[in-house]
């Protein structure tokens, strides 16, 4: 039913990290202080109200949580300590579960046990597959004739690449279907009529914002933005190399340090390593608004990312130093961490914001364009009416 | 004929008067007038040295009339009259000219302002010679008190007065004492039992030897004046007469009937009930819908009939906190029940009320804001017959929403009793546009009325909660006890007087007197002014077609000579 007030939703939202939903008394300080809110996209107060009232449909159609980059300015100024910034964060978690049609996301956000069980199951599957594939009869082949590490013998890159591709298709399928779901919830169900041409004219915004994280830079906290940008670019670089170009990236030949394969690898590794460490440090210190409150899923994401990076570094170190067995074991461990991390985080959890954010900006622009069109039409109608009266 | 020796004092009022009026020039001009013995100016006439100046001059120069040209007489006429008294002169041999509010504060041309001031002072000088000595009058106070209404206010005042040994006649129209509070289960903010509180009060009242209780009775007539009232009291069987010196009106209020609000469908849609109905339910200990089942969703709507020009413009004052009380009661009786509190503004006035709001917000309740002036929610019955849906625009979100509820509690307004006008007429007081009794001064004297000896307390003056009603009741009791303790009260001396030789008996005067001070003497066939009830407003004097009424201190002679004085001076100084 349309806009039915639902008091039960508040209990549900608590699981996503909403702490004190009755704290806010709607003074509007937070919206006044937010550097990112603007006419037509007012937040965070309005979303807090929808949460308090349990307006499911309004919330599902709200793009505002994605437009918030959690600078925390609002929480600092809130006279009731209602933590508006964290409310927006909790809403992003909730919306991730709303867009996900499989229900897995909701399961992960609502139960620690479910999340860890999923991680272990996927890790175990990877382990079993690794054991099956690495049963090469002739163990001497594990070493190159020069005595180096023959990772492509132990673990043929084609197999891994095939697995990669399967995973990629699966992840992309899930993520895209979730984005389509999001599109329905925020545009179609809200009765917004988008002019066909605008789907193309506004598309650059999607690309540009994904690359530059430009909106984020509007927040006052510059270092935070740099670290985040570094982390995102590193992540994307590595993701592309590992998933799309693994045959180029995983070679037995050790190239010189200035080879693009190694340069890109180092850049990405450094970005991930420094970035994850920075966020782990911030979340433990709890001094900044945006790291004061951590949901367990935040920790899972950052820890899995850090461990993937660390194991990746170890694979590299062991390999160039010719430590064959160590390389192989750590390689399996690396896969056991990386796979669940990607499988869980990309379509169902924290990682997905990398996709939802730019899409939210895109959808918001579509919405604005539609509204402007509507306004123009209204004005024209009024004008015509006036003329006919005259 | 006595020789008039007038002393005239022109006040500077600091710079208030002196900056726009040339006070020295006024003094020079006034000195020339006949009968003026001395004329002086001084910085602050109302100060102690200023008053002493008058006293000293009266003694030294044997002055017998005084004029002070200063501010409005409202504030300092009593001050200067006192000074005259201190010097042994009758205080009514005094006249004040207002050259501040009527001259310096309202004019910008110093020459014209000075000229006007001269005129006003000359008028006062001309007038004051016609002043007569008037003597203060006192009346004895009958020590009994009549209290109308035996709710918390009436009973609290009755006990207060009776405890100090004075007799109280307590009149109640119902067959029981206790008023509105008797119908309430728990009271806010501490959620303790009203029943207990009120039964103790009732018991103490009933057992008090000095309180005479008349239930199921009504007052038919009140006559007399402060200190000496009489009333006719009747019940089913008999009529009796009471005598008393003071009256306290504490008749309380009643609930508004919300069935005239179309949107809410009260009496039309099942399970839409008023706060009074809900209170009965709580009193009986069972919250239930019409089909006997416990409701899973209860909506509470605030300001029903309050704060809306179509019904009552005022705030009913207690319903917000009563709603919070309901939320607490519902959530302890039915913890699973969803409560929707549809409010316009949460008015948590009073000690510990904000705290009640804060703690109630943590219950299973959702607060939703609506516009009580222009956009009342619409309640519709659903097809299933079990639930109703409530639709409105929620203000904090701006969304049009709807709620499904099994029961709706309307926080109905309170309104003045239907017979307030009648009572006001009996007691010679007035009601405001909402039918509540009007106090003497909204800030400085919220307990007394414009009729001396008549006091008001509790919700008959305006909606209020229990502590505020009791505060007002006890304040009234203290005022009444103070007059009883004095034994006498001073009454107005500048009253009206009918010249029986001229009066034609038309009774025009009686029909215009706002204080019911005039009665008709059947034997003599003339009207008579009761000098104790008369406030000297002068209305009758101007209404009398025969010119038979004289207002003391405002005789034709006094006023005409004042006008002459002003005009002569204006011609003189033109
Ligand atoms: S979250 Fe805080 S700052 Fe924002 S409206 Fe609510 S009380 Fe005000
Ligand atoms: S955290 Fe920053 S961006 Fe997000 S709502 Fe608050 S002020 Fe706005
Ligand atoms: S007390 Fe509250 S509910 Fe009652 S009239 Fe006033 S604002 Fe409305
Ligand atoms: S109006 Fe004058 S004439 Fe008429 S009754 Fe009164 S005093 Fe007498
Ligand atoms: S002066 Fe006023 S109060 Fe006195 S009798 Fe005349 S009308 Fe009544």
Image (cartoon, rainbow, N blue to C red):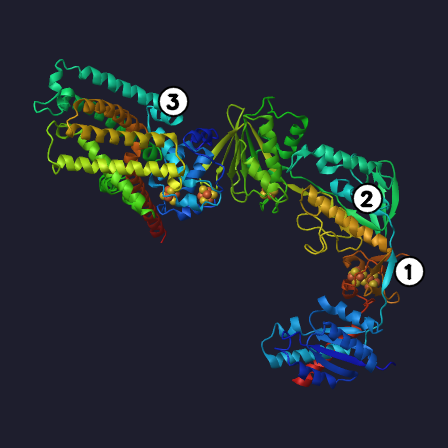
Q: Residues within 10 Å of mark 3 (few under 14, many from 20)?
A: few
The residue pinned by badge 3 equals A113
User: Label 3 near label 1: C-beta < 8 Å?
Assistant: no
Q: Residue A146 location in percent, x, y?
A: 8, 25
**For residue B524, which numbered disc appears in the image?**
1
Extreme residue in the right direction: B523
Q: Alpha carbon of mark 2 to alpha carbon of mark 3: how far?
A: 78 Å
CA gap, disc 1 and disc 3: 105 Å
Q: Nearer the viewer, mark 1 or mark 2?
A: 2
Chain bearing mark 3 = A
Label 2: chain letter: B
Residue B466 in view here: yes
Answer yes or no: are tags 2 and 3 on the same subunit. Answer: no
Residue in view at x 45 percent, y 38 percent: A49
Under tag 2, what secondary structure? strand
Please identify, in this view, whether the residue under mark 2 or under mark 3 is nearer the observer. 3
- Of the 4 image quadrants, the one containing the N terminus of chain B is bottom right
Tell me: residue B120, above or below residue B368: below
Label 2 neighbour load within 10 Å: few <14, some 14-19, many 20+: many
Residue A103 visible? The answer is no
Residue A247 sits in quarter? top left
Q: Quadrant of residue B92?
A: bottom right
> What crowding class fits label 1: few (fewer than 14 Cα within 10 Å), some (14-19), or many (20 or more)?
few
**Left or right position of B23 against A206:** right
Image position, residue B524 (x, y; %): 91, 60
Q: Position of residue A362 (x, y in %)?
A: 28, 39
Chain of the residue on which disc 1 is drawn: B
* Residue A40 numbered mark, or none: none
Residue B434 percent location from the top left of the image: 66, 48
* Most distant residue in the top direction: A137
The quarter of the rendered structure image containing the C terminus of chain B is bottom right
Which label is found at residue B219?
Answer: 2
């Amino acid at each position: 039913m349309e806009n039915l007030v639902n008091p039960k939703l508040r209990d549900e939202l608590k699981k996503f990290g909403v702490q004190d939903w009755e704290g806010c008394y709607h003074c509007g300080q937070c919206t006044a202080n937010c550097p990112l809110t603007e006419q037509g996209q007012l937040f965070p107060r309005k979303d807090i109200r929808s949460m308090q009232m349990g307006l499911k449909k309004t919330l599902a159609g709200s793009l505002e949580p994605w437009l918030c980059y959690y600078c925390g300015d609002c929480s600092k100024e809130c006279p009731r300590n209602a933590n508006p910034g964290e409310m927006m964060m909790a809403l992003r978690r909730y919306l991730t579960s709303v867009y996900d049609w499989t229900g897995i996301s909701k399961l992960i956000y609502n139960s620690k046990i479910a999340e860890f069980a999923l991680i272990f199951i996927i890790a175990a599957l990877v382990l079993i597959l690794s054991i099956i594939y690495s049963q090469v009869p002739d163990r001497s082949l594990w070493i190159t004739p020069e005595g180096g590490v023959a990772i492509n013998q132990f673990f043929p890159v084609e197999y891994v690449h095939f697995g990669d591709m399967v995973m990629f298709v699966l992840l992309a399928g899930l993520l895209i279907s979730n984005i389509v779901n999001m599109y329905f919830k925020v545009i179609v169900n809200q009765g917004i009529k988008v002019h066909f041409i605008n789907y193309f004219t506004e598309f650059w915004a999607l690309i540009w914002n994904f690359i530059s994280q430009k909106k984020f830079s509007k927040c006052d906290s510059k270092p935070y933005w740099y670290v985040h940008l570094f982390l995102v670019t590193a992540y994307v670089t590595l993701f592309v190399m590992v998933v799309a170009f693994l045959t180029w990236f995983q070679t037995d030949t050790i190239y010189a340090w200035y080879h693009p394969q190694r340069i890109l690898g180092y850049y990405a590794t450094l970005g991930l390593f420094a970035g994850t460490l920075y966020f782990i440090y911030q979340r433990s210190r709890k001094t900044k608004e945006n790291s004061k409150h951590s949901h367990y899923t935040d920790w899972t994401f950052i820890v899995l990312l850090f461990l993937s990076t660390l194991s990746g570094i170890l694979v590299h170190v062991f390999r160039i130093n010719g430590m064959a067995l160590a390389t192989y074991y750590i390689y399996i461990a690396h896969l056991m961490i990386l796979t669940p991390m990607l499988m869980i985080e990309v379509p169902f959890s924290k990682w997905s914001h990398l996709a939802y954010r730019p899409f939210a900006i895109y959808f918001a622009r579509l919405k604005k364009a539609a509204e402007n069109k509507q306004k123009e039409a209204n004005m024209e109608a009024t004008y015509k009416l006036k003329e006919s009266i005259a | 004929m006595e020789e008039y020796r007038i002393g005239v004092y022109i006040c500077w009022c600091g710079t208030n008067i002196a900056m726009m009026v040339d006070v020295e020039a006024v003094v020079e001009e006034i000195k020339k007038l006949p009968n003026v013995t001395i004329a002086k100016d001084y910085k602050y006439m109302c100060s102690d040295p200023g008053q002493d100046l008058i006293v000293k001059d009266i003694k030294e120069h044997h002055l017998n009339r005084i004029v002070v040209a200063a501010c409005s007489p409202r504030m300092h006429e009593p001050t200067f009259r006192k000074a005259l008294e201190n010097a042994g002169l009758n205080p009514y041999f005094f006249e004040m000219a207002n050259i501040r509010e009527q001259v310096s504060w309202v004019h910008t041309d110093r020459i014209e302002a000075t000229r006007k001031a001269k005129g006003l002072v000359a008028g006062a000088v001309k007038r004051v010679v016609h002043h007569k000595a008037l003597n203060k009058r006192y009346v004895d106070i009958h020590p009994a008190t009549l209290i109308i209404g035996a709710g918390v206010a009436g009973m609290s005042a009755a006990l207060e007065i009776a405890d100090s040994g004075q007799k109280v006649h307590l009149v109640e129209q119902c067959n029981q004492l206790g008023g509105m509070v008797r119908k309430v289960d728990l009271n806010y903010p501490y959620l303790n039992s009203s029943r207990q509180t009120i039964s103790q009060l009732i018991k103490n009242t009933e057992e008090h030897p000095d309180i005479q209780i008349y239930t199921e009775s009504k007052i038919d007539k009140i006559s007399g004046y402060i200190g000496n009232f009489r009333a006719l009291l009747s019940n089913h069987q008999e009529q009796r007469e009471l005598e008393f010196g003071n009256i306290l009106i504490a008749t309380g209020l009643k609930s508004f009937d919300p069935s005239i609000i179309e949107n809410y469908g009260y009496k039309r849609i099942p399970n839409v009930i008023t706060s009074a109905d809900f209170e009965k339910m709580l009193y009986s200990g069972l919250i239930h819908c019409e089909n006997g089942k416990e409701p899973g969703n209860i909506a509470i709507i605030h300001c029903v009939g309050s704060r809306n020009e179509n019904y009552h413009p005022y705030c009913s004052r207690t319903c917000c906190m009563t709603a919070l009380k309901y939320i607490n009661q519902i959530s302890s009786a039915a913890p699973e029940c969803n409560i929707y509190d549809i409010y316009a503004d949460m008015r948590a006035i009073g000690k510990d009320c904000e705290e009640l709001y804060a703690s109630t917000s943590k219950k299973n309740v959702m607060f939703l804001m609506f516009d009580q002036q222009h956009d009342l929610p619409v309640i519709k019955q659903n097809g299933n017959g079990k639930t109703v849906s409530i639709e409105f625009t929620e203000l904090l979100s701006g969304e049009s929403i709807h709620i499904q509820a099994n029961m709706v509690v309307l926080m109905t307004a309170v309104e003045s009793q239907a017979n307030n006008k009648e009572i006001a007429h009996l007691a010679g007081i007035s009601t405001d546009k909402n039918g509540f009794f009007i106090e003497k001064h909204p800030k400085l004297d919220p307990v007394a009325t414009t009729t001396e000896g008549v006091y008001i307390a509790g919700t008959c003056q305006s909606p209020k909660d229990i502590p505020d009603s009791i505060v007002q009741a006890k304040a009234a009791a203290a005022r009444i006890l103070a007059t009883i303790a004095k034994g006498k009260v001073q009454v107005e001396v500048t009253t009206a007087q009918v010249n029986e030789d001229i009066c034609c008996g038309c009774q025009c005067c009686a029909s215009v007197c706002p204080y019911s001070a005039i009665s008709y003497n059947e034997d003599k066939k003339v009207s008579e002014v009761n000098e104790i009830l008369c406030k000297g407003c002068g209305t009758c004097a101007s209404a009398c077609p025969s010119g038979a009424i004289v207002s003391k201190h405002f005789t034709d002679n006094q006023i005409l000579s004042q006008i002459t004085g002003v005009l002569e001076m204006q011609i003189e100084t033109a």
